[in-house]
Structure formats: C-alpha cells, structure tokens
Image (cartoon, rainbow, N blue to C red):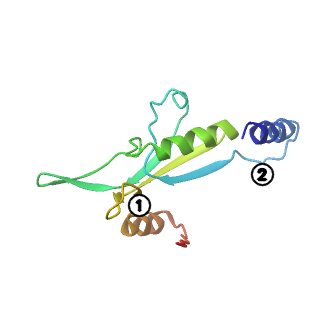
C-alpha cells in the first residue's frame, strides 16, 4: 500500500508541470455504509455526499446522514482513498445496510442501491459469488 501511494504521488508531481486543463482532480464515488468525517485521518477533508438510508423513528421517517458509518467500513475506505490520493474529491453515497440472516456481516439493501443509481444516473453492475 505504501509503495503504491508513493508511486501515485509521483504521477501527481509530474502533473503539476503540465498545463493541460483537462487534467482535473481525481473524483471518487465511495458507495458504502457512510463515512465518519470526524475521524482524525479525515478531519481536514471536505466531502460531498448523499444518503439513501431511510429509517423510521416512531411515526416519522428520517434519512441517516452520509457522515455516519454504521460499521466503520466506509470510513476505512475513505481513509485508504485519501492515503493513496490526498487530493481526491470523495463523494460519499450512503446505502441502506442490514445484517444477513444468521450473520453479523453487513449487506447492501438492493432497493437502496437502485434508488441511488437512478438519482445519480449511475449504472450499477453487481455480481455475487
């Protein structure tokens, strides 16, 4: 990981000497369970995001914020992305998760992924093994 991050940063250093306006910043869509933006490794990073995680609190339906990670996985992924490419613009897309029957492993709720893709004009391909 460290070697890859080092090599990637060398490419960024070369880019600084090129005045091609088409070379914009790297943009990453982080599609996961949210990202804890208060994590010490992520404090000075500006995120954009949207949540597709509805939940019911009494009679009221609410949306869980994209800056809240239910398992920490999305936070870990954001940290790794930032480590490899510190200048990347990270767009957090929080999807609804649930624990599978007889398992503690979180899974993405399919309706949540479909709704997110339709609103963002994203084509999702999902293959389960």
Quadrant assignment for the C terminus: bottom right
Reply above or below: 43 against 85.
Answer: above
The percent coordinates of residue 107 (x first, y second) are 41, 60
Task: Determine which quarter of the picture holds residue 83.
Answer: top right
The percent coordinates of residue 35 (x first, y second) are 46, 42
Which residue is identified by label 1?
Answer: 107
Crowding at dot 2, Cα within 10 Å, few <14 / some 14-19 / many 20+, comes out as: few
- State the residue at coordinates (53%, 35%): 46
In the displayed structure, does residue 60 sit left or right of residue 73? Answer: left
- State the residue at coordinates (51%, 28%): 43
Of 98 and 66, nearer the camera is 98
The percent coordinates of residue 36 (x first, y second) are 44, 37
- State the residue at coordinates (56%, 53%): 29
Q: Residue furthest toward the front?
A: 102
Q: Is residue 118 visible?
A: yes
Quadrant assignment for the N terminus: top right
Task: Determine which quarter of the picture holds residue 55.
Answer: bottom left
Crowding at dot 1, Cα within 10 Å, few <14 / some 14-19 / many 20+, comes out as: some
Which residue is identified by label 2?
Answer: 22
The percent coordinates of residue 70 (x first, y second) are 37, 46
Give the mark count. Answer: 2
Reply above or below: 79 against 114.
Answer: above
Foreground label between 1 and 2: 1
In the displayed structure, does residue 34 sit left or right of residue 89? Answer: left
Callout 2: SS: loop
Sooner in the amino-acid sequence: mark 1 or mark 2? 2
Q: Is residue 85 visible?
A: no
Callout 1: SS: strand
- State the residue at coordinates (11%, 55%): 59
């Amino acid at each position: 990981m460290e070697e890859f991050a080092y090599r990637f940063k060398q490419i960024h250093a070369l880019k600084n000497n090129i005045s091609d306006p088409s070379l914009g910043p790297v943009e990453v869509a982080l599609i996961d369970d949210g990202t804890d933006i208060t994590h010490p490794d992520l404090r000075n990073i500006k995120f954009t995001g949207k949540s597709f995680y509805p939940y019911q609190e009494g009679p009221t339906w609410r949306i869980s914020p994209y800056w809240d990670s239910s398992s920490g996985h999305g936070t870990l992924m954001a940290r790794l992305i930032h480590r490899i490419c510190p200048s990347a613009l990270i767009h957090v897309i929080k999807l609804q998760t649930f624990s599978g029957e007889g398992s503690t492993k979180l899974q993405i709720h399919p309706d949540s992924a479909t709704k997110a893709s339709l609103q963002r004009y994203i084509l999702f391909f999902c293959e389960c093994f």
